[in-house]
Image: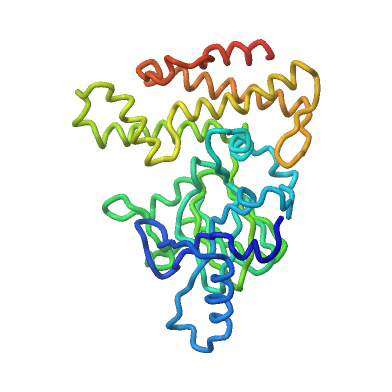
Amino acid sequence: MGSSKDLGLAEVPVADCDQKHYNSQQKETFLLKNYLSKYWLNHKCEENKSHQKCLYLKDWHFVRAYPEAKIYRTPIFFCSDWLNEFWEKREDSQDDYRFVYLGPKGSWTPFHADVFQSYSWSANVCGRKKWIFFPPGAEESLKDCMGSLPYDIAKSGQNLDALGALTVIQEPGETIFVPSGWHHQVWNLEDTLSINHNWINATNILQVWRQLLAELLKVEDAISDCRSMEKWEDQCQLVLKASHGMDFIEYYHFLRAIAKPRIESLRSGSDLTVLDGHRQGRRHTEYDVQRLRDALLALLDDHHVGHLDTFESLAEPPAALLDQLNDLL
């Protein structure tokens, strides 16, 4: 990592906890040094904070910005992380789902479920958080007459405990695991620094597929009046990618990128190196291959795939990859 001066020039996303933007918070970009010196220090020194903005540095892609820093290693419990493994392999685009959060006491994150039906983990470096979780399906009781979920469950006016809410206080040095599909809202009870990852692996890949398909059906319903247009199915995929962040072809590229090193590992008889240099044994890799096969079968069984031009031009179509996986099982 460069000098502290270089780090101060990092551009970081900062959310205004008092300004709603659709179903999230209004964000702007700060230089880290300005966030710390012009906001954080003033915020700490100001006696009357009631008129101050509550600004939360969140979703900072620190690892992506400073890959050489190596300030932490993904815990072994979470190293089977296909989502970040996929983005590390990509050469056409740079992204990841590894974030640093830094927020003052009182900063918070609105009610939501994590992207793509991913898992997430959140480790407090310092500070304390309050989490309120709803198991999948329990959040339905919070929807309004338009079918929308609340932005802030603290203002929902409902008895959250009676609806199945689970409240957890996360202490310094503790790590929270968030299962797929669990809606949650989070408050910083103290000034808090945390590291957060979203991740997907063999155990939730079919949930990722089911949500992707459900989101496509929503898109098709929303633009059903255009069904007669040429290549309507491909247009639906474009909208799906824009609204959900993933379409069918990217889902297939994701599966293929994860499958290839596992196929090679089983063929060669060697252990697989996964995220942050962790080693994965043969039994685990065999399980991955089984679930990848299940995911490919689900994709191929869906009638949409046969109508999409993007699958026609693939050098290695899903059926060919499926054959390779079947040969190993």
Left or right, 244 with respect to 87, comes to left
The location of residue 55, given as percent across then percent down, is 49, 70
| On screen, residue 204 above or below 77 | above
Residue 161 visible somewhere in the drawing: no
| On screen, residue 242 above or below 270 | below
Please tell me which residue lies in front, 187 or 154: 187
Give residue 17's quadrant in the image.
Answer: bottom left
The location of residue 305, given as percent across then percent down, is 40, 19
Give residue 200's quadrant in the image.
Answer: top right
> On the rendered image, what quadrant is the C terminus found in?
top right
> What's the residue at 49%, 83% (across, down)?
49
| On screen, residue 212 above or below 29 | above
Left or right, 86 with respect to 138, comes to right
The location of residue 157, given as percent across then percent down, is 37, 67
> On the rendered image, what quadrant is the N terminus found in?
bottom right
Please tell me which residue lies in front, 137 or 301: 301
Left or right, 266 with respect to 63, comes to right
Give residue 62's quadrant in the image.
Answer: bottom right
Residue 312 visible somewhere in the drawing: yes
> What's the residue at 72%, 35% (across, down)?
274
Total numbered circles: 0
The location of residue 13, given as percent across then percent down, is 50, 60
Please tell me which residue lies in front, 202 or 233: 233
> What's the residue at 61%, 72% (across, down)?
191
Q: How is the rendered protein coloured? A: rainbow
